[in-house]
């Protein structure tokens, strides 16, 4: 873990992001656009559209997420943006806001297959907390999966609740037994 570092996604490290996500765009061509789109728009989109949309966000200097690097290789990704930018959260029955506070959300992760199960998501969560402190963000929110069983990697992109708990996140809402809403208060 000593050789790892975190960087915000930007035009400078876009090539590393592309390499991490691969030709398929991480999970089925998502390019981390799933939470940013209404369901109908998501169904009508494809990997190319999602790629271009993410690239536009980055070119416009919008915060989209954090990359973790091992040397020059990006090995993990954590999406992070203001909650209001994630359209899908506004329509998810179990993920409705609990208040009108300005919240930044961590809706998903993508870890290179060779680095899964090695604490990279925890490293990213702690990195997101540090990044939030440096950027005067007061509340981080996440919607991880709660499970005691080993799950296929493709179902774990939300993160795991007990990892968030170990990083200091607290459950603030539990409308679903398998998907708690969790927060980390920085102030």
Image: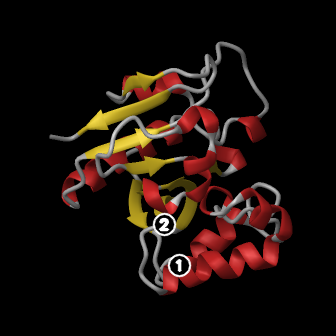
Q: Where 43 falls versus 102 (above or below)? A: below
Q: Is the residue marked by circle 2 packed among few (<14), some (14-19), or many (20+) residues within 10 Å?
A: many
Question: At x 64% / y 61%, what residue is drawn?
Answer: 32
State the CA–CA distance, disc 1 to disc 2: 7 Å
Determine whether, in the image, residue 46 is placed left or right of residue 174.
Answer: right
Image quadrant in which you'd find residue 137: bottom left
Question: At x 56% / y 78%, what residue is drawn?
Answer: 14
Q: Where 141 falls versus 26 (above or below)? A: above
Q: Position of residue 91 (x, y in %)?
A: 62, 48
- CB contact under 8 Å: marks 1 and 2: yes
Question: Please, what secondary structure does the residue beneath circle 1 have?
Answer: helix
Residue named by callout 2: 64
Residue named by callout 1: 57
Q: Nearer the viewer, residue 173 or 77?
A: 173
Say how the picture is coloured: secondary structure
Question: At x 64% / y 39%, what residue is drawn?
Answer: 116
Q: Position of residue 41 (x, y in %)?
A: 76, 67
Q: Position of residue 173 (x, y in %)?
A: 45, 24
Which quadrant holds the N terminus? top left
């Amino acid at each position: 873990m000593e050789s790892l570092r975190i960087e915000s996604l930007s035009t400078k490290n876009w090539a590393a992001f592309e390499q991490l996500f691969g030709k398929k765009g991480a999970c089925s061509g998502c390019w981390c656009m799933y939470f940013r789109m209404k369901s109908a728009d998501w169904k009508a989109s494809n990997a190319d559209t999602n790629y271009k949309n993410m690239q536009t966000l980055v070119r416009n200097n919008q915060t989209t997420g954090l990359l973790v690097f091992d040397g020059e290789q990006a090995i993990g990704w954590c999406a992070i943006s203001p909650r209001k930018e994630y359209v899908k959260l506004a329509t998810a029955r179990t993920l409705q806001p609990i208040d009108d506070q300005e919240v930044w959300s961590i809706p998903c992760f993508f870890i290179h297959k060779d680095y899964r199960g090695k604490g990279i998501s925890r490293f990213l969560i702690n990195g997101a907390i540090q990044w939030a402190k440096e950027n005067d963000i007061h509340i981080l929110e996440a919607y991880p999966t709660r499970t005691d069983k080993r799950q296929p990697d493709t179902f774990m992109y939300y993160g795991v609740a007990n990892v968030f708990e170990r990083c200091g996140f607290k459950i603030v809402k539990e409308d679903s037994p398998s998907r708690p809403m969790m927060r980390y208060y920085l102030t």
